[in-house]
Amino acid sequence: MCIFLIQQPVHAQGMNETRQVALENKELPASVPRFVFDSGLKFDYPDAVRGIYVTGPAAGGNKLNELIKYVDETDLNAMVIDIKDDKGNVTFKTEDPDSPYAGIGKDYIKNPRAMLKKFEDKQIYPIARVVVFKDSLLAKEKPELSFLDGEKVWKNGRGEAFVNPFLKEVWDYNVGIAIEAAKMGFKEIQFDYVRFPEGFENKEDDLKYDVGEYDEAKMSHTAKRVQAVTDFVSYARKQLEPYDVEVSVDIFGYAATLPEAPGIGQNFTKISENVDVISSMIYPSHWTSYFGIEKPDLEPYNLVKEYAKLENGKLKELKTPPTSRPWLQDFTASYLGDGNYQRYGKEEVEAQIKALNDNGIDEYLLWNAANRYTKGVDYTP
């Protein structure tokens, strides 16, 4: 007999306790199926996921019906819903009084089950987005789980705080939220911000933080960061196995162009080996002239084509590669300045999709932070 342990923080009295939930897993004959959680909702995996991003407030408001209608009338078939957002807010309030997350959620999505039932009726594949290590809320509540600059929680230039990927308590906090989403009926958990802060290698000597179980590891600081991020992804996937969900991770597009992105701890290959789906963020506006394209935002087809060729090569090296499902750009990057950007509309969105399709990649997600998506797009060009 083996005991399967999941650590989850208890928040009814703040964020100061951790409870252990022991699940007894007896040795069973191979012919006996193991326990798989059944939410009572049924979703079939689409022929190829073609989805859009939806914020918590939009998912819980009148905007949702508009987006459902749009997806239903097009070749789109999936939605990525914020369940834990970029600030660290959980976007729903659990109805389970015994949940370790009771009392801490925002009332954005007032009835997650009713939302998912609408998705089931329309067969819209539901993906729960959980932002992991960028979390100003948890950092404020428990500074010891973050990075300290003197006695204060360190924040980046945008005023955002991160929590520490080295710490198991941080892992369990986020995995627990993912399990809540799986119990609701989401068919996939998408982890975002699975990394250290950008440029962390330039700050690490000036900040105070706990390296946890990695303190005694005989490896460089760079290797420790990569190991911690990779270990989290592997751990999360194992904890979610009983819930019959796919596990995906968002990753910087440039991470695939390097052996690893050492500052932030992302190794494209190692993360890909531990997920069902890899979603590289390959917005043309976010690139420099890496592929020899001087102004990438002006050449969406060429940028995506070059990236897809590179990623295909990386994934072919893996024994069991994940599904590739990149994030594409459906927004205008005017912040790049005159001459460096263009207004993104039907032609630009279709160009990115076609570049993926031409390179054997059929799945994708569209990002627009305001959830305003271009009308009239051919989503299967």
Image: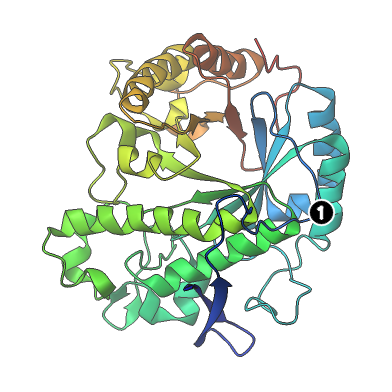
Q: State whether residue 191 is above or below residue 103.
A: above
The C terminus lies in quadrant: top right
* Residue 314 visible (yes or no): yes
Name the residue nearer the viewer: 273 or 346: 273
Name the residue nearer the viewer: 147 or 310: 310
At 70% from the left and 50% from the top, the residue drawn is 186
- Quadrant assignment, res 291: top left
Three-letter code, disc 1: Gly
At 40% from the left and 68% from the top, the residue drawn is 163
Name the residue nearer the viewer: 140 or 363: 363
Q: Whole-percent x and y of residue 160?
A: 44, 62
Name the residue nearer the viewer: 49 or 378: 49
Q: State whether residue 92 is above or below residue 76.
A: below
- Quadrant assignment, res 208: bottom left
Q: Whole-percent x and y of residue 140?
A: 47, 77
Residue position marked by numbered label 1 in the rendering: 40
Q: Whole-percent x and y of residue 126?
A: 71, 44
At 60% from the left and 51% from the top, the residue drawn is 129
Q: Whole-percent x and y of residue 23?
A: 57, 74
Q: Secondary structure at mark 1?
A: loop
* Residue 211 visible (yes or no): no
Question: How many discs appear?
Answer: 1
Q: How is the image coloured?
A: rainbow
At 52% from the left and 65% from the top, the residue drawn is 27
State left or right for residue 24 relative to residue 204: right
Q: State whether residue 350 is above or below residue 225.
A: above
- Quadrant assignment, res 307: top left
Badge 1, how many Cα within 10 Å: few under 14, some, many 20+? few
